[in-house]
Image (tube, rainbow, N blue to C red):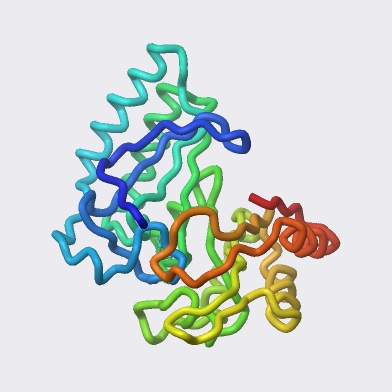
């Protein structure tokens, strides 16, 4: 079963890697809204959620976040990280930059040690406001699952037919290393067609782009929860570690989630 986040603010959840993480969902609370439709998306398919396409208003996000942060600080458990994720692509929010500025101001005032993270699929980097906002957060985590347009079309189903890996890579280079590249590795079939971004050809071409983008660090991971396409396989940890070792040989830190 895939599942949605039903609140604007969710968690906090404690993880070994991030510490105490509070989530912010800018997308509709009752449907998924994304510029990709990844075959592994934990929220399910876009089409499964035809509900109200309403972004959570900036003021409501700020007010709810402030209330939760105040409570957490008062209880002596401020978050270690505030993470923008949720039911789709956060940078689609029309006031994304203002929301980020509100969040940074709240963080500075209430829990200055907390880091602000955004998990994005990098499809909105053509918007200057999105680039500015992502340039201000502590962890600008951008997805790139393959060096090949054809594979991205199979794996991520970009909703914009004009999507290209090349344009995405060029936009990523604009951050001059102030970004974290995140890549999901998997293999299997979807709708009877094979999909695999772990072949020698795939990994070599992806590594060449990693070297070109020169992100501050890279995170590789594989399937963890249920996916809308049930015939996908998890890549074993040893294989992810071998890919990570190749990234590190480029002089770029790489973690395996
Ligand atoms: S980019 Fe993220 S939210 Fe969008 S479809 Fe892919 S996994 Fe789901």
Q: Is residue 181 left or right of residue 29?
A: right
What is the x, y in percent for residue 46?
29, 68
Q: Is residue 203 above or below residue 150?
A: above
What is the x, y in percent for residue 210?
70, 68
Q: Would residue 127 be visible to someone looking at this image? A: no
Q: Would residue 46 be visible to someone looking at this image? A: yes
Q: Is residue 102 left or right of residue 135?
A: left
Q: Is residue 58 above or below residue 73?
A: below
Depth order, front residue of 237/104: 237
Q: Residue at x 50, y 25 (%)?
A: 112
Position of the N terminus by quadrant: bottom left
Q: Residue furthest left?
A: 52
What is the x, y in percent for residue 62?
27, 36
Indicate which quadrant contains ligand 1.
Answer: bottom left
Q: Residue at x 35, y 70 (%)?
A: 35
Choose top left, top right, bottom left or bottom right for residue 149: bottom right
Choose top left, top right, bottom left or bottom right for residue 180: bottom right
Q: Is residue 231 above or below residue 151?
A: above
Q: Residue at x 21, y 39 (%)?
A: 59
What is the x, y in percent for residue 16?
61, 34
Count of marks placed on residues:
0
Q: Is residue 61 left or right of residue 127?
A: left
Choose top left, top right, bottom left or bottom right for residue 251: bottom right
Q: Residue at x 41, y 17 (%)?
A: 73
Q: Residue furthest right?
A: 249
Q: Is residue 207 above or below residue 71?
A: below
Depth order, front residue of 169/13: 13
């Amino acid at each position: 079963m895939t599942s949605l986040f039903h609140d604007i603010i969710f968690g906090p959840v404690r993880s070994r890697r991030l510490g105490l993480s509070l989530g912010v969902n800018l997308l509709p609370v009752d449907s998924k809204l994304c510029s990709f439709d990844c075959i592994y998306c934990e929220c399910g398919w876009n089409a499964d959620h035809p509900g109200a396409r309403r972004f959570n208003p900036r003021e409501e996000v700020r007010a709810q976040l402030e209330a939760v942060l105040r409570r957490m600080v008062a209880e002596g458990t401020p978050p270690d990280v505030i993470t923008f994720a949720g039911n789709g692509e956060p940078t689609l929010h029309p006031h994304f930059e203002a929301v980020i500025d509100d969040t940074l101001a709240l963080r500075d005032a209430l829990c200055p040690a907390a880091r602000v993270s955004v998990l994005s699929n990098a499809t909105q980097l053509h918007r200057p406001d999105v680039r500015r906002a992502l340039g201000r957060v502590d962890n600008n985590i951008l997805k790139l699952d393959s060096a090949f347009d054809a594979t991205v079309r199979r794996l991520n189903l970009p909703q914009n037919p004009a999507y290209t890996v090349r344009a995405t890579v060029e936009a990523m280079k604009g951050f001059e290393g102030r970004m974290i590249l995140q890549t999901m590795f998997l293999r299997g079939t979807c709708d009877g067609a094979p999909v695999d971004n772990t072949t020698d050809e795939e990994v070599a071409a992806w590594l060449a782009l990693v070297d070109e983008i020169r992100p501050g660090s890279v995170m590789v991971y594989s399937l963890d929860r249920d996916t809308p396409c049930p015939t996908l396989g998890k890549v074993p940890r040893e294989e992810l570690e071998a890919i990570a070792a190749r990234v590190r040989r480029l002089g770029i830190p790489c973690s395996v989630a």
